[in-house]
Amino acid sequence: QVQLVESGGGLVQSGGSLRLSCAASESIFSFNVMAWYRQPPGKQRELVATITSRTITNYADSVKGRFTISKDYVQNTIYLQMNSLKPEDTAVYYCQGRRSNFDYWGQGTQVTVSS
């Protein structure tokens, strides 16, 4: 069973930065797409950023220019660099990996941005 483990969340002031990590228990070569989602308090989960096996990236309009998704095949880890954070970025952030039409999810990491 594939495991995805997020880390790097925390409390940061508005305008600050955080880097989230998602470590996979297996090679990330096996995933067609990996992504970061987030779920703000009282709202539905939303897509933040994706990265394909060909390292094609895509971002939600709300984070374009501020967030960067990347991956490290040696560490079997994907990252989400978050800059210029805003209070509305406060959410639980989840890592997701899709392989053979099955989605694997991490347990989530809390990001709180204070104003």
Image: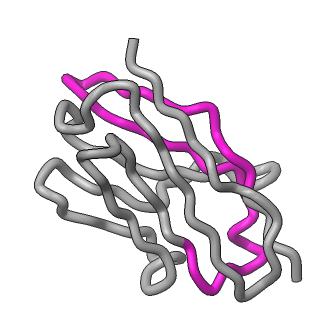
Residue 85 position (above or below residue 109): below
Q: Nearer the viewer, residue 30 or 42?
A: 30
Q: Which residues lie in the magenta part?
A: 82-110
Q: Is residue 33 magenta?
A: no
Would you say 111 lies left or right of 23 here?
right
Residue in the image at 45% along x and 77% along y: 61
Q: Left of 1 or right of it: where is 10?
A: right
Residue lying farthest to the front in this orientation: 74
The quadrant where residue 64 appears? bottom left
Query: Of all residues shown, which one is farthest toward the left?
Result: 54
Rendering coords of residue 13 (x, y %): 82, 80
Q: Quadrant of the N terminus?
A: top left
Q: In the rendering, at what x and y percent does residue 2 appear?
A: 39, 19
Q: Is residue 103 or residue 114 the one in the foreground? A: 114
Front residue of 53/44: it is 53
Q: How is the image coloured?
A: one colour
Query: What percent of the width, then of the height, locates residue 112?
Result: 80, 63
Q: Residue furthest top?
A: 1
Measuring 26% from the left and 44% from the top, which residue is drawn there?
A: 33
Instruction: Give the position of the C terminus as an image quadrant.
Output: bottom right
Tally the numbered discs: 0
> Looking at the image, is 50 positioned above or below residue 95?
below
Side of 56 relative to 109 (left or right): left
Q: Residue at x 72, y 80 (%)?
A: 86
**Residue found at x 64% / y 40%:** 108
User: Is residue 91 highlighted in magenta?
Assistant: yes
Residue 34 rendering spot, x and y as whole percentages: 33, 45
